[in-house]
């Protein structure tokens, strides 16, 4: 901790043995910003309070009966309950295993096929994305304005498609000063895009950036890309995810020959289509199981999945799909079930993107110790990255005495790096640690090297 690159930062470290007793502590009871170590809380609470077979349902309702000719003389309403798994993603470390990986349109196409199987051939009305299962607030107030343009701060909605983001692929133009080549996927016909870029001389610095008029579908790119640069991809948050989901469903239905005469619309008002939710859905899809929702949260630190799970948890248990209700459940769990002092943490969001979150190292280690023996810990433990394997620890602790024996959650935001998890001992009794570095000016590489060196010392 006294190495020159990091000695001016604030350090908190704790090591607990198999009985939960402290074997080492340094500022173990001081509060630190945890970054993505916050994800340990929402995944622990969901594992403990939701059944392992929990799945989120996405339902299709019709505002009029399906006629004998297959025509719906009204709207088609898709009602989401927070399923984030309509995306291109793998849900296990073995990406070659059957069923582990999904393509982008796999689940959306399955939902459209279920509509077709109900006999629907044409909808005279529109296709409505109803996101009212969650609160209408899509962004946490502590997330920075610029962050809201990007995948890691994507809007948190009850309907989710492609992580509520657009894939923006770009490459240099054919010659200097030519516009940069930019493509958008999925192309749903919703976005107004303006290309203000140009190709820069070879060897110069890349300056391209993407912007949006807040709350709108108007996106533009400006700056430049060097002529010798490679193709790159950015992930840009959408403005209205419930509308995007409805538009994607329209495309999937069209591929099955099902047309709609009305517009694509969205709502977060729970009263507008409430009456139709009292009827039987004409089609329905369930999400992947809880463990598969936990895996991307812990293994690759996917923020949207964490925030979605927090609101799903709140809606399922308290009936209110909001940040406030979800955080209250987390607080109750930490105090009443884990036995943490209420002054040893402060909760703001589910992902750790907010710098308003605060935890002591002992709190995080205590949660990990609690979950080690919890009867519903299988998905939680399987989701944590392991040194040398797929996930955020893939290149960490390699060629050290702890290679393959550190199972832990990473965390990183501006001036903050953290790591909390388990050290697997040769005797089979894992010890728990939390290392938190705040308020530092070191590079990311220097900060991670210092943290990893500390964990190796704890292991010794």
Image (spheres, rainbow, N blue to C red):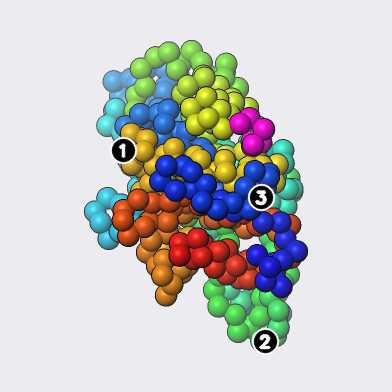
Foreground label between 1 and 2: 2
Q: Which mark is residue 413?
A: none
Q: Are marks 1 and 2 in contact (CB under 8 Å)?
A: no
Disc 1/disc 2 C-alpha distance (Å)? 50 Å
Q: Earlier in the sequence, mark 1 or mark 2?
A: 1
Closer-to-camera residue (302/198): 302
Foreground label between 3 and 2: 3
Closer-to-camera residue (420/21): 21
User: Is 118 left or right of 169, judged from the image as shown?
Assistant: left
Disc 3/disc 1 C-alpha distance (Å)? 56 Å
Q: Is residue 344 magenta?
A: yes
Residue that numbered label 2 is attached to: 203
Q: Secondary structure at mark 3?
A: loop
User: Is 308 left or right of 65, judged from the image as shown?
Assistant: right
Q: Position of residue 76 (x, y in %)?
A: 45, 27
Q: Secondary structure at mark 1?
A: helix
Foreground label between 3 and 1: 3
Q: Secondary structure at mark 2?
A: loop
Residue that numbered label 3 is attached to: 27
Position of 238 relative to 223 (above/below): above
Residue in view at x 24 percent, y 53 percent = 98
Q: Position of residue 17 (x, y in %)?
A: 44, 48
Position of 19 relative to 441 (above/below): above
Query: Residue 244: in sight, yes or no?
Result: no
Dot 1 crowding, Cα within 10 Å, few <14, some 14–19, many 20+: some
Residue that numbered label 1 is attached to: 113
């Amino acid at each position: 901790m006294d190495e020159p690159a990091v000695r001016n930062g604030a350090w908190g470290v704790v090591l607990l043995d198999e009985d939960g007793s402290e074997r080492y502590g340094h500022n173990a009871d001081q509060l630190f910003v945890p970054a993505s170590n916050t994800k340990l809380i929402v995944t622990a609470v969901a594992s403990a309070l939701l059944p392992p077979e929990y799945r989120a349902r996405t339902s299709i309702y019709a505002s009029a009966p399906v006629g004998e000719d297959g025509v719906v003389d009204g709207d088609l309403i898709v009602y989401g309950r927070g399923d984030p798994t309509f995306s291109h993603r793998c849900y296990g470390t073995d990406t070659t295993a059957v069923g582990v990986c999904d393509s982008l349109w796999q689940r959306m196409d399955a939902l459209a096929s279920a509509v077709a199987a109900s006999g629907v051939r044409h909808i005279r009305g529109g296709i409505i994305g109803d996101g009212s299962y969650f609160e209408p607030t899509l962004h946490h107030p502590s997330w920075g304005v610029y962050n809201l343009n990007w995948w890691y701060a994507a809007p948190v909605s009850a309907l989710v498609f492609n992580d509520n983001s657009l894939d923006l692929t770009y490459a240099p133009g054919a010659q200097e000063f030519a516009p940069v080549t930019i493509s958008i996927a999925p192309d749903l016909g919703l976005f107004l895009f303006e290309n203000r870029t140009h190709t820069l001389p070879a060897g110069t610095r890349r300056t391209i950036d993407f912007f949006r008029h807040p709350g709108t579908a108007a996106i533009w790119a400006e700056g430049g890309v060097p002529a010798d640069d490679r193709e790159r991809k950015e992930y840009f948050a959408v403005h209205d995810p419930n509308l995007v989901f409805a538009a994607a469903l329209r495309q999937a239905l069209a591929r099955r020959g099902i047309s709609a005469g009305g517009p694509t619309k969205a709502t977060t008002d729970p009263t507008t289509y409430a009456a139709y939710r009292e009827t039987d859905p004409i089609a329905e899809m369930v999400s992947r199981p809880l463990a598969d929702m936990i895996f991307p949260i812990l293994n690759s630190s996917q923020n949207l999945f964490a925030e979605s799970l927090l609101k799903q948890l709140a809606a399922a248990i308290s009936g209110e799909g909001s940040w406030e209700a979800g955080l209250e459940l987390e607080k109750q769990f930490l105090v009443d079930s884990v036995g943490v002092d209420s002054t040893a943490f402060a909760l703001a969001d589910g992902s750790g993107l907010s710098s308003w979150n605060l935890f002591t190292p002992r709190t995080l280690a205590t949660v990990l110790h609690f979950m080690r023996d919890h009867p519903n810990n299988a998905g939680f433990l399987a989701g944590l990255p392991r040194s040398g394997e797929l996930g955020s620890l893939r290149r960490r602790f390699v060629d050290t005495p702890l290679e393959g024996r550190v199972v832990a959650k990473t965390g990183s935001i501006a001036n903050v790096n953290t790591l909390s998890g388990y050290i697997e001992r040769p005797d089979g009794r894992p010890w728990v640690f939390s290392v938190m570095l705040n308020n530092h000016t070191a590079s990311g590489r220097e900060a991670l090297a210092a943290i990893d060196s500390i964990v190796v010392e704890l292991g010794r």
